[in-house]
Image (cartoon, coloured by chain):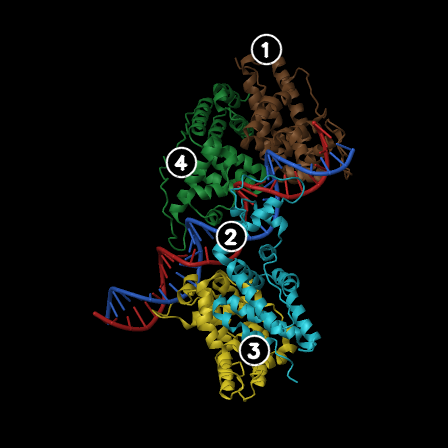
Chain colours: A yellow, B cyan, C green, D brown, E blue, F red
Amino acid sequence: MSGIDQPTPRRASIGAKRSPASEAAILAAARAVLAEGGYAGFSIDAVSRRAGAGKPTIYRWWKTRADLLMDVYDAEKASMLTQPMTGDLTGDLVAYTEGLWDFWSATPSGRTFRALIAEAQSNSAALDALRLKFLPKRTLHLSKLFTAAAGRGEIAESEIETRLALYIGFNWYYVLTDRLDEGRAAIPAAMSLIAAPASR
Amino acid sequence: MSGIDQPTPRRASIGAKRSPASEAAILAAARAVLAEGGYAGFSIDAVSRRAGAGKPTIYRWWKTRADLLMDVYDAEKASMLTQPMTGDLTGDLVAYTEGLWDFWSATPSGRTFRALIAEAQSNSAALDALRLKFLPKRTLHLSKLFTAAAGRGEIAESEIETRLALYIGFNWYYVLTDRLDEGRAAIPAAMSLIAAPASR
Amino acid sequence: MSGIDQPTPRRASIGAKRSPASEAAILAAARAVLAEGGYAGFSIDAVSRRAGAGKPTIYRWWKTRADLLMDVYDAEKASMLTQPMTGDLTGDLVAYTEGLWDFWSATPSGRTFRALIAEAQSNSAALDALRLKFLPKRTLHLSKLFTAAAGRGEIAESEIETRLALYIGFNWYYVLTDRLDEGRAAIPAAMSLIAAPASR
Amino acid sequence: MSGIDQPTPRRASIGAKRSPASEAAILAAARAVLAEGGYAGFSIDAVSRRAGAGKPTIYRWWKTRADLLMDVYDAEKASMLTQPMTGDLTGDLVAYTEGLWDFWSATPSGRTFRALIAEAQSNSAALDALRLKFLPKRTLHLSKLFTAAAGRGEIAESEIETRLALYIGFNWYYVLTDRLDEGRAAIPAAMSLIAAPASR
DNA sequence: TCGTAATCGAGACGGTACGTCGTGTCTTGCC
DNA sequence: GGCAAGACACGACGTACCGTCTCGATTACGA
């Protein structure tokens, strides 16, 4: 996917507006750099070199590294994920999670995600972006699943936040330790606990 | 704590062996640097300057930044944490977690921990150290709690790993988003789910 | 000369081309460092600090320390030397040499020259630069003097090289032992021998 | 010659006096280091490692790098040079010079000599040692040759110093530019000029 | 119709940090 | 007191990135 890797014969300005060609080239370069070197190799200089783009062009459109990382992640995601909603919370969570982990493993998105979290540890703007922009959008379907289950009376409304935190944390733990393959078998049991009906 | 911050009148070598004074000064400086600047300000140069130590001295004893971070974390931890084991898994987990979050908030250890995870995203040696050295030691008491509960028949033996992952992930999620205070209220409910008895 | 020593309020880039202001500041700083500390104090770090310039800027334009030293020497030289050519070889050599020694003593150029020769002893690129770039340019006028004398039949054509070597060596001996003042009186006799007519 | 390169099975102290074995090992190591890396590779650390000697042992007996270099040079020299004195000044100078250049080329002494001069450019103690200890000893025979010629009335007494400077400079020029082979053919003509009889 | 303005690539700028090497000094523990 | 060993504080090495700046070119748009 994303065959956008042309040798870039110098993209001149197209006037006083953002160049889609440059944007695409920069995102593709960032993706490639992350795929090859992970967070360690991810630098604006490297992306700029690879994209044949000027550094100011990158800084103009992405104020922080985190913004660029999020766009790379979004460009990849684009509809790839199944969003099951069968009414079986545990099953839906399992299906969603397995799809997510496939996505993280099959594309550079796992590395992108790890880079984003790392970035958020040294840059408070990145942390804010992660909390306010990235996570809410990414967990939207999950919120719906939990909300629907609460609507059905399976779980308490007040615990949605907590269960979501457990869900996110479970995923983070495995992706941040680069152990998605080892953790795969644990998904069903974990989802079962996260989706466990209110006990009384 | 750690009143070791004297102006260091040049610590000479004490012979062909490691100088405890230098080691202490470096750890104290690293702690201070993390406390003030977090992962963003944490550089070997900064630690070296602050400690009045030569960079080679740091590199001689800590091969990677992660090694230094882990030692800073350990130096702080030193017995501060309560390790409850009452037989009530949920209660023990709640008590342990609240102690941990206090520890993370009251000392620079929360920042140190975040730095360590960030470091592990760009350095595979750091990731290995995190997985093989740091985490097992840090989660030892938790393992015991789960194992004991399994012994009592409350949870399945096969789910210990999974429940531990849920536990760790829950903590990581809140510390990595720098939201320990917001998540505090969710601890009991989360622990309750993590410690939920096998359903059948 | 060279009143360029302003406190340098951060020279920004002037585009994708070399900044004359930075170049001048670096050369002036190098000159000052050599004047104060000689070869012992001459480090790229010291020049960088003094110039308020980044180390990469220095390395970008001067690939070796020798290149920088030669430019410092050239910047100073700039027309200061008399280049007598009266037809009296001995007299011309004496006049030229005295001018050269004045120049070496009155400016940091003597130290620069010594640094350059020292540098050439540990760096083969520097040695090559000294042999192929620096010396030929610096001895051009001397070559002309000897060639003219050979044209007049005063010395053998085949001995030009040898007499030049004797001339250069004589100067090197005194400057490298930092004894220009002690050797001054010997200049006329030495030049007389170097310019001695072919005996048969 | 100098097969002193044993693997050094830890030379313990031989009591409160200098150990000849250590001294020999250090000189041999310094010789080897100079032979392999020239002045660029010559460091007290390198010599210490190679000799299996402690750095303090080197600093105890050789106060400056120059002292060590001079001892390495002396250890090599040891009687190798012919010291002709036939009464023919030019011929004696030619013979002596050719022997010297052979010596410089066949042993690491050429490199040692170059290192010594380089060292003298950054260290004033080294320069003093070069001027007051090394050169007078090394040029003793040459002084005798010139003095004898002056005694025979061939050259003026007052010019001995000058002619010696011309002689030394000629040698320095070729050795410091690492061009002994290229300059060899010029030796007779140069010596002839240096030894030229007082013209009137 | 044409200037103005914003974009593009390029790459230099002052900095900071990297991880390594060498300096000269100091101590230890053996001889 | 000499010795090997090696740690110490210091500071230079040459390189990578940072985020900012200026350039000269290209093009769209509003006066």
Q: Position of residue B47 (x, y in %)?
A: 53, 50
Count of picture labels: 4
Q: How far apart are marks 4 and 2 (CA)?
A: 53 Å
Q: Position of residue B121 (x, y in %)?
A: 57, 64
Question: Of discs 3 and 2, which sits in the foreground?
Answer: 2
Q: Say few, some or many: other residues with alpha carbon within 10 Å of mark 4 (under 14 / 14 to 19 / 20 or more).
A: few
What residue is pinned by disc 3?
A100
What residue is pinned by disc 2?
B32
Q: In this view, does D112 lie above or below B46?
A: above
Residue under the point 76% across and 34% down: D12
Q: How far apart are marks 4 and 3 (CA)?
A: 70 Å
* Secondary structure of residue under mark 3: helix
Q: Residue under mark 3: which chain is it in?
A: A
Q: How far apart are marks 3 and 1 (CA)?
A: 102 Å
Front-most of C129 and A89?
A89
Question: Of discs 3 and 1, which sits in the foreground?
Answer: 3
Q: Dividing the image into 4 quarters, which one contains the N terminus of chain A?
A: bottom right
Labels 4 and 2 positioned on one and the same chain: no
Front-most of A157 and C143?
A157
Q: Where is residue C24 in the image (x, y as percent from the top left)?
A: 40, 43
What residue is pinned by disc 4?
C78
Q: Is residue B44 visible?
A: no
Q: Residue under mark 2: which chain is it in?
A: B
* Secondary structure of residue under mark 4: loop
Question: Of discs 4 and 2, which sits in the foreground?
Answer: 2
